[in-house]
Image (spheres, rainbow, N blue to C red):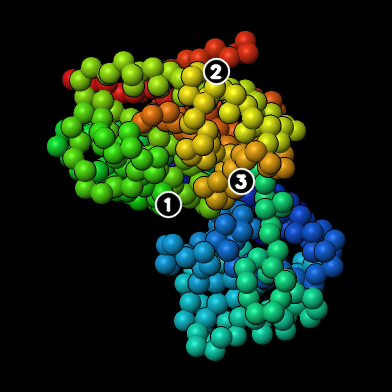
Amino acid sequence: MTERIRKSLEIDGQEILSQQEWNAELNEKQQRLSEWLKRKEYSAILIRRHDNIAWATGGASEGRVRIPQETQVFSLLITATGGRYYLAGKNEGPRMHDEEFGVTDFEPVLYDWYADALLSEAKRISGGKLAADYPTGDIPVENLYELREVLLPQEIARYRWLGEEVAASTADVLSSLEPGMSDYEFEALVSAALLSGGVLPSVLLMGADDRILKYKHCVARGGELRNYGMVNLCARKWGLVISITRFVHFGKLPQQLADCFAASAQVNAAVLDATREGTTSAQLFAVVKNAYAKVGHAEEIEKHAQGGTTGYNEREWVATPAGIQVVRNSQAFAWNPSIKGTKVEDTVLLLDGTIEMLTETPELPVVETSYNGKVYQSAGVLVRN
């Protein structure tokens, strides 16, 4: 086995991956890339997107400076013959070596930051037909999702850690909310909890009371919490993304909300039960549509995307009526059925025919729903006096 990285992955003294396990992952990914390049008849691929960089480096390298930007301050070049390079301005060179690539087998290719030499250097090294995962000059653009849609055991280990961390932070913040707080404060509390653990929030949808009932994407706008609050977020580390939503209600939960949560849980159970290897996006959409109709809310399918696969993007694909994507083993999913101000959203893993919850919050209420002879759990509402 080629040595790709010379360290283990540890968080606060906890070993997530041994050095041997991390190397096995990186070797598998290099093999996938090499075979793909030869099949496509490319000499090399220039990788610039943050999701693909995170995947190709096993989460070991993070070059994001401007958070919303799709590309990073460095790019990867991987050749069909096994060459592995990182390309960056000379001004970034010392940090790239010290914090991102010094313990890996990637070789540096550095140029003056003002030289605009990324493409010319990539073409020089590739020595043949070059592709990229992001529009760059006159070279063809390729989508690398097919290479990363199935998660390796090492990615699943990182995902489990991340799911537990994000779920715990979400539950802590939800339990700390009090009437009179603004949704901006929700946002700040969640962000602080995540960032203090090295996890980056990527979606923050925080709302209170009437705005939750009115809008599916309830972006914080300074609303004040009276009775009903929502903490809805996505967060990432090592490139992997976790999605989760939780609710709190002060005072007796209105029966209409309770009924809608139970109905959302029924839809959630139906789509989880249908999330099986070989099922298509279109079939999953049909399951959700039928489930809404059965609980008396057929109109809800028209009001919001219902979720789909996740991994290195908040949603890699979303279930649609004509969707041709196919569920595969070892994929992560984030479904988000919602009815009249209620929503069920967790991140789960399909592994060998079993749905594994990555975002369990056992300290919060759970709704158990029987479906097709199985019991599925959905998050309930934390009711406080």
Query: Along the horizontal axis of the image, is 366 left or right of 356?
Result: left
Instruction: Tell me which residue sits at (52%, 47%) in the image.
Output: 314
- Disc 3: which residue: 317
Tell me if residue 363 can be seen.
no
* Amino acid on which disc 2 is placed: Lys
How far, Cα to Cα, is label 2 from label 1? 34 Å
Above or below — where is 90 with respect to 181?
below
State which quarter of the image contains the N terminus.
Answer: bottom right
How far, Cα to Cα, is label 2 from label 3? 25 Å
- Disc 1: which residue: 202
Mark 2 and mark 3 lie on one chain; the one further toward the N terminus is 2
* Amino acid on which disc 1 is placed: Ser
Query: Along the horizontal axis of the image, is 198 left or right of 299?
Result: left
Mark 3 and mark 1 lie on one chain; the one further toward the N terminus is 1
- Disc 2: which residue: 294
Indicate the secondary structure of the residue bearing disc 1. strand
How far, Cα to Cα, is label 3 from label 1? 17 Å
Instruction: Tell me which residue sits at (61%, 55%) in the image.
Output: 55
For the view shown, which residue lies furthest in the front direction?
299
Characterize the local packing of mark 3: few (<14), some (14-19) or many (20 or more) Cα atoms within 10 angstroms. some
Nearer to us of marks 2 and 3 is 2
Nearer to us of marks 2 and 1 is 2
Place residue 103 in its image quadrant: bottom right
Residue 278: give x, y in percent of width and height: 75, 33
* Amino acid on which disc 3 is placed: Trp
